[in-house]
Amino acid sequence: MNKRIRIRTMFIGGCFTILFFILLARVFWFQVANAEFWQVKAKETWSTQITLNSVRGTIYDRNGSALAMDAPAYTVAVSPKIIDHLKIADEVVDMLHGILNKPKDELYKIATAKKDDGEFYQQREVHPEGWKVDVEVAERLKEEIAALSKETEQKDVGIYLLEMDKRYYPKETLASHILGYMDKEDKPVNGLESYYDELLRGIPGSISYEKDRKGYKLPTANEVYKPKTDGKNIVLTIDETIQHYTEKAIKAIYDQYKPVSVTAIAADPKTMEILAMANMPNFNPNSYWEAGSQAAFYDHAIRSIYEPGSTFKIVTLAAAVEEGLFNPNEWYMSGQIKVKGWPKPIRDVKRGGWGEITLLEGVKRSSNVAFVKLGIEKLGEEKVKQYIHDFGFGQKTGIELPGESKGTVSIERTIDVATATFGQGGVVVTPIQQVAGIAAVANGGTLLKPHIIKEIVDPVTGEKTKTEPEVVRKVISEETSRKVGEYLEQVVSDQKIGSGRNAYIEGYRVAGKTGTAQKAVNGKYVDGKYVVSFIGYAPVEDPKILVYIIVDEPNDPYAGGGSVAAPAFKEIVSQSLRYMNIPSNKSAQQTEKKEGKEKTIPRTLVPSVTKQRTADAKSQLTHAGITFETIGDGDEVIGQYPEAGLPLPQSKRVYLFTEDPKNMDVPDMKGASLRDVIEMCSLLGIDYSVSGEGYVVEQTVTQNGDVRKAEFTLEPSAPSDSAEDESEKAEE
């Protein structure tokens, strides 16, 4: 018995000895061998870091109107634990379903969610419908939460609104393809949001310190502070008003002809600043998930490639004029022409042609035969290839947007060169390439890199990085540019045979060219499928705006660039020229001059009265001789229009908002410009429609439930703040 006890004692003692040595080995491993690693882990336990989120930069149009900005938002969360305790799951589900429109079964799962151990979660967020909801939805939720709290006599009913920021696009669909959007996970998608994400996002900061087991900062702890760097603001070359004109015009085409897409680009040909760029279909970045299809997100202006059709004839014409080979009075036989090595003749759009006509008439009628003669018989194949390259085709333009295509130039055979002279076959271009190339014809012969960024501004230091015009190369001479402009002007001004006559604008010299290109599918041209377009600029003598419109597969097989795209060009350019205060030939002749100088009417700068007492603001404006209108019954001015620092025409007024603009009536806008209408309706948060152009002469406001809509009628006669009218008044 004693022997057995001794053996057991020795065995147990041996086990304890082995365990002791194992413990010593583990202690040595942690305390000595891996001491540095575990020191870092321990420090993480008693240290904490608070992230200081940076503010994402704002994107503005060229006049300072915000197109993309950060705005307050809320995420809806629930506490299954509290909801279960109060037995109000059904009430919570019904309330959230009514406001967020989320299915009840999904809400019920969230409101009653349990952990693996069977305990209810303390908090669960309602995704995606309750993620980053706007202020209006949050206010409705607050009212319902307060009512439920009163009903249950509990302060905390397990429904929360977590404050955060979200990306907000105040102009909604305007310029959506340019801007892109931020998704609900705060990731940039497409457009400038993606291309300039690092610049816009900024750099988050942080505060680090040591804490006790309860989470309180230790009195002797060192605090490490890393300041945040807010994102930079971006000012675009886009003009909100011209963008509005453009989107309205192409939407009318899209609604009428139901094409695959419509694209329009407006640019200043002298600087290649993009004034407007739009596509249909489009989307609302604030609710991108409602777009319906991926086609709505595609930016055709820089990504899609097309055979340009007859708009490309401008390149052939410019090359022939530059080489001294274009004689407008030279006669040729239209109808068809044979090309060496190709069995079939190339034909004009009119079978049999127009008989023997001059080359200038061939340009007006958009004769394919005329341009094949210019390219093959006069310029020669190598010169045609050289000019196509020099005008920038087959190369990316370098515009500051993601996903730009470079198009293709594949013209090896003689027939390829022949068809390229009138924009079919081996030349496939992007709309932005076409705009840059034809702008070189308009601006005096210089190919410029297109830009959509005007300047980048540091919000802290105010430092600005401006984008200057960037020359790629000289393509043609100024004299050639002038001559080609005059020839293209006749394409529009000749109301009898000009293919672009529907783009004619009374009082302005307009140059332009139509295009109708048959589409190829699997290498074969298909009857009834066309891409129709129009490109032009005005005024010819001093171009201020160039516009290109391209319509992919209108539902009318007989529709051409002259009947579909040219009228939209006319609408955009005529409105834009008046908006830009470019005088028509008629008004220029009537401009009175005194002592060799035009009379000018000095304009007062709008003072800043925001955050002033209403009475003080009224007094300040009265003493400054400024007409104003107060909107609302508040005691303090919370907003104003126009903004401070802008010049105010003498007959215009300043609007003072003393309450939330979205809750107030629409003021009398008679005499206001379209830009004023757009800004005012945006501030008031109402839908609007506009007919006519010029200045407001009539307005009506209708109410359908909670939705208000204003209708404005505009007429082109300028209000009395024009220099001419003010001069007449002064003389009287």
Image (spheres, helix red, strand yellow):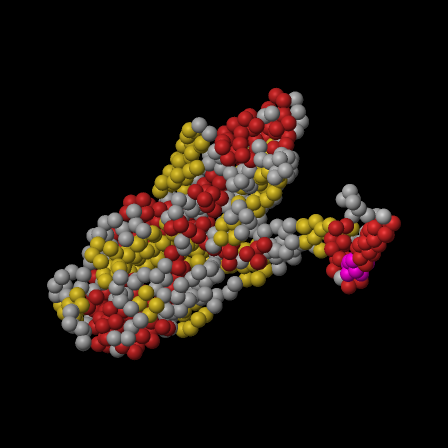
Left/right placement of residue 472 relative to residue 6 reads left
Question: With 160 as the anchor, is 295 left or right in this view?
Answer: left
The question of residue 330 being in magenta is answered with no
Q: Residue at x 61, y 43 (%)?
A: 164
Between 515 and 517, which is closer to the camera in this rendering? Answer: 517
Overall secondary structure of the magenta section: helix
Residue extending furthest toward the front? 1
Q: From the top left corner, tell me how far across and down residue 131 is, in percent.
A: 55, 41
Q: Is residue 18 above or below residue 161?
A: below
Instruction: Give the answer, above or below, for where 236 lies relative to 412.
Output: above
Q: Residue at x 23, y 49 (%)?
A: 556
Q: Which stretch did the figure color magenta?
A: 22-31
- With 95 as the anchor, is 364 left or right in this view? left
The C terminus appears in which quarter of the rendering? top left
Which residue occupies the extreme right position in the image? 2
Q: Is residue 104 visible?
A: yes
Picture residue at 47% right of the left edge, 68% below the top? 470
**Where residue 400 sits: x, y (%)?**
48, 61
Q: Position of residue 209 (x, y in %)?
A: 77, 51
Whole-percent x, y for residue 430 in the image? 36, 62
Look at the image and tell me whether residue 517 can be seen.
Answer: no
